Image (spheres, grey):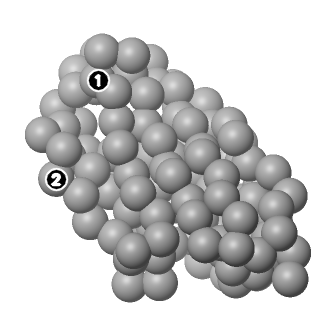
Amino acid sequence: QVQLVESGGDLVQAGGSLRLSCAASGTFFSVRTMGWFRQEPGKARELVASITGAGITNYADSVKGRFTISRDNAKKMVYLQMSSLRPEDTAVYYCNLHPPSRDYWGQGTQVTVSS
């Protein structure tokens, strides 16, 4: 069983930065690939970034060079450092396994970028 709790979302001006955190519980966390996803109202949830247990990362083209995903396996944490934020980054951000499990979606954390 895995529980995931996201935090760190906020209202920020365009060009600003935020760091999202995801606290995980459950066993075998260190070997699981984790992802950050986001969802805008009326749109499908999309993968933003992923990181394997070994630290190999992948990013959506829309965030490459601006977002950095990282993890601390000892603390069972996953982070998303976001910089040069744009209004189109406004969404609810979620962490989950990758590929995601529908059983593990949390409440997410709202990121709003004002222009």
The amino acid type found where label 1 is placed reads Asn
Identify the residue under disc 1.
Answer: 73
Question: To which quarter of the image does residue 41 belong?
Answer: bottom right
Q: Is disc 2 in contact with disc 1, using a CB cutoff of under 8 Å?
A: no
Residue that appears at 86% across and 58% down: 11
* Residue 14 placement (x, y as % from top left): 76, 75
Identify the residue under disc 2.
Answer: 56
Which sits in the foreground, 19 or 100? 19
* Residue 18 placement (x, y as % from top left): 66, 52
Q: Which quadrant holds the C terminus?
A: bottom right
Question: What number of labels is visible?
Answer: 2
Above or below, comparing residue 16 to residue 106 in the picture: below
Q: Is residue 2 left or right of residue 110?
A: left
Q: Which quadrant holds the N terminus?
A: top left
The amino acid type found where label 2 is placed reads Ile
Residue that appears at 38% across and 84% down: 61
How would you rate the neighbour count of disc 1 (Cα within 10 Å): few for under 14, some for 14-19, many for 20 or more? some
Q: Can residue 103 be seen in this view?
A: no
* Residue 66 placement (x, y as % from top left): 48, 71
* Residue 71 placement (x, y as % from top left): 34, 36
Question: To which quarter of the image does residue 87 belong?
Answer: bottom right
* Mark 2 residue element: loop
Question: To which quarter of the image does residue 85 belong?
Answer: bottom right
How would you rate the neighbour count of disc 2 (Cα within 10 Å): few for under 14, some for 14-19, many for 20 or more? few
Q: Is residue 11 left or right of residue 24?
A: right
Above or below, comparing residue 55 to residue 60 in the picture: above
Mark closer to the chain start, 2 or 1: 2
